[in-house]
Amino acid sequence: MSLFKTLTEKPWERKGIIGGLNPEGAFDTPPERVALGFFLTIASVIFSMFGVSYVIRMSLPDWEPLAEPFQLWLNTGLLAISSIFFQWARNIANAGNQKNLMTAFIGGGVFALLFIAGQMVIWENLQATGFYVASNPANSFFYLLTGLHIAHLLGGLWVWSKSSIRLLSGSKPDDVRLSIELCTLYWHFLLIVWLVIFAILSNT
Amino acid sequence: MAYVPLADQDSEMEMHHPHSWVTKYVWSQDHKVIAIQYGGLAIAVGVIALILSLLMRMQLGFPDTFDLIDPSSYYQSVTMHGMIMVVYMLTALLLGGFGNYLIPLMCGARDMVFPFLNMLSVWVYALSVIILLSSFFVGGGPTGAGWTLYPPQTALAGTPGHDMGIVLMLLSLAVFVVAFTMGGLNYVTTVLQYRCRGLTMMRLPLTVWGIFVATILGLFAFPALLVSAIMMLFDLLLGTSFFMPAVIESGTPLDHNGGSPILFQHLFWFFGHPEVYIVALPAFGLVSDVLSTHARKNIFGYRMMVWAIIAIGGLSFVVWAHHMYVSGMHPYFGFFFATTTLIIAVPTALKVYNWVLTLWEGDIRLNAPMYFAIGFIFTFIHGGLTGLFLGNVVIDLPLSDTYFVVAHFHMVMGVSPVLVIFAALYHWFPKVSGRMFHEGMAKAHFWITFLGTYAIYLPMHYLGFLGVPRRYYAMGSTDFIPESAQDLNAAITIAALIVGAAQILFFINIFWSLRNGKAAGPNPWGSASLEWQTPDTPPKHGNWGDELPTVYRWAYDYSVPGAQEDFIPQNVPDGDEPAADEQHFDSDHGVSKAGA
């Protein structure tokens, strides 16, 4: 919809039915996708707030940079593979195929679980080497941002698990296409968020 | 193929029909039941906050007379009163209550887009209230840090509730944000996607516009509160130093080091200022519809009103630091925020002018909702004008810590939205209950509340000019404050007690009318907007019977020249309205006299 056109309409002059079955100004898309768009915007705002806080806090004198573990690169790879699997599942579902759909969709979630496990291992290693959450603000932000990202992934995995159960119980691709598409969008979003977090954490 | 919204697919609309008393009234997915749950709970916590304020006033008006509260419980009352009123009462009632009830009905939809999420929203909100109120029962009691919760004071031993109280407060706020997000996603998506056929965005009543834009503000502003709550919880529970600087408490250095309290203030007010408009914009919308309906005139300058709502919403994100002038900031920074603050007065004043011009030469029906709506115009102008004072850095600095600020924000975002809430509750009560309220009791409620709030807040401006500091439990021996200030304080307290007691009239009226009120009929005010055109009153589950409405016109066709009645409902086709007697048309004013 054209925002300018909408807002300059003179409703007192226009009478009668305007638009077809779709009310004028509605997005030509399912409401679930609209809601997800809003949710991703909110999540972006949340991560941005943390990002701004990070930059401000970093400028204070007690900041001691944290050497990011090499394993983060490995975990990044796992999340990227997860995202690729979801995209694969989306493409299959869009084509209306059944073959490999389950492998692609469930595989995407499994790689996300591996990513989370990998992040946990990093937390364990940091703790073991004395980098505790309260030792330094850089450490605090590391745990906070990675934890928050994991929390968002867990939310996605809850939806993924529900859709996976539907797939495993024999739903057709058409029935789960929207769920798969929304999961894919969400995973791509979380991959981008992770890349930005990784860049910020590395830039100390 | 274009996506066809469910609102237009009668046969395919998946309604969740209740099968038992529990699914009908407790775990209900019907937006109307959820609205009443939201509204009822918000009003209930509002009453608690009102009682806390009366306790504070007893202390301030008659120090050393009553033994009701000590300094600690005074600060706890200040904190809980502020937070409950702003977040748990006003936000929840205006968006969760009115938003839930009116959005689907005004949009011609059967329900919200995601009814299950909507149900979750109200119960998560209830959980946040339980967590908040539980802080009254833990050791140390609720936090007494002031509703702004500024660190490091929040966490220090001298502050009441510095251990569990503040943790429960932050936890409750985080849960509230989750509840709000679930509700908010529903409101915006329903407005965008579930409008019925013919209902363009610019045909929506201003109520929907106000709630829609306020929800978007909330969705973008509440994350700042969530972020600050999470980081402060880390500081309190895990010993991090996001906000906590190096502090020596009772001679002992704390473990914290190097945190930035100012960072918290920025985050808090990045939420806190839009929060003012999250409350104000729905109130602006509601009052516009009440004024227009009871003045029997279309709202003056509809497009300008929509643009003003959007402009105020946008500007509200760039004024937050005017709450922080006294924290010390670069003069250019202060200049920027003073300028943006004063600019926001332009669209706000535009709305006030348009409300007044809506009344101009209207066929005004002075009933109870209209009393409250006109009362709002008065209080909002007064509260707004003092905002112009405080928006300027040089005036704010000496007044910031005085009762002038208390008077200002209570007039502009306490009394004003509450008057609109009462206007709206009385206005839509006949639709919700199917019965009329007692008009005389409602008018008595108005006069006591309206005159009483002036008796409370007008003198507070003078106290502020005298330099009487706010937040103090007792003044002690303060030479620069004349003794007569205490007389004024006593008078304010008496007025506050009367106003507080008068609210009982409202509850008596509502409960009495639910049983004994006259049958209201479907559209007792002769309103043109869609929610009054439902086939059943109160609307049944699904709202619209077998067929969804089709909209042919905007929501403000009042006193249309040539029309037989002085309103034409939105779902009446163009040309089908009965022809009027041409002789009654007054060409000078373009207003039909047929209904006069």
Image (cartoon, rainbow, N blue to C red):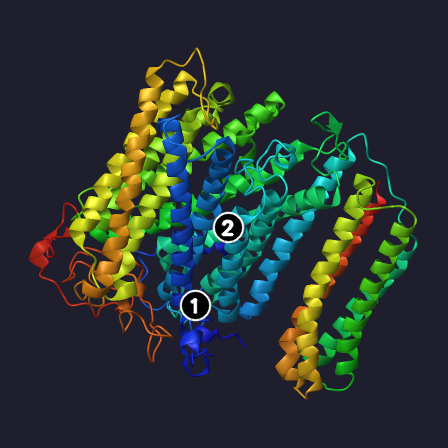
Left or right of B587: which side holds A77? right
In this view, the residue in front, B39 or B419, is: B39
Residue B579 rendering spot, x and y as whole percentages: 14, 66
The picture quadrant where one finds residue B164 is top right
Image check: B97 left or right of B145? left
Q: Residue furthest left?
A: B583
Is B236 placed above or below B9 here?
Answer: above
Camera-nearest label, 2 or 1: 2
Circle 2 SS class: helix
Q: Is residue B367 left or right of residue A52?
A: left
Q: Position of residue B322 (x, y in %)?
A: 53, 30
Residue B334 image offset from top left, x and y in percent: 57, 25
> Is disc 2 in contact with disc 1, using a CB cutoff of under 8 Å?
no
Mark linked to residue B12 = none
Please report, as a chain letter, where disc 1 is located: A
* Distance from the alpha carbon under mark 2 to that under mark 1: 43 Å
Which amino acid lies under the numbered mark 2 shown in the image of this protein? Leu
Mark 1, other Cα within 10 Å: few <14 / some 14–19 / many ≥20:
many
Q: Residue at x 26, y 59 (%)?
A: B511
List x then y, in percent, for residue B538. 29, 69
Callouts 2 and 1 in the same chain: no
In the rendered view of the protein, which quadrant contains the N terminus of chain B? bottom right
Secondary structure under the numbered disc 1 in the rendered image: loop
Residue drawn at x 65%, y 36% as measured from the top left: B155
Q: Identify the amino acid type marked 1.
A: Pro
Q: Does the rendering let one see residue A1?
A: no
User: Residue pushed farthest bottom?
Assistant: A170
Q: Which mark is residue A23?
A: 1
| Circle 2 residue | B133
> For this rendering, which residue is in front, A190 or A94?
A190
Residue located 32% across and 26% down the image: B490
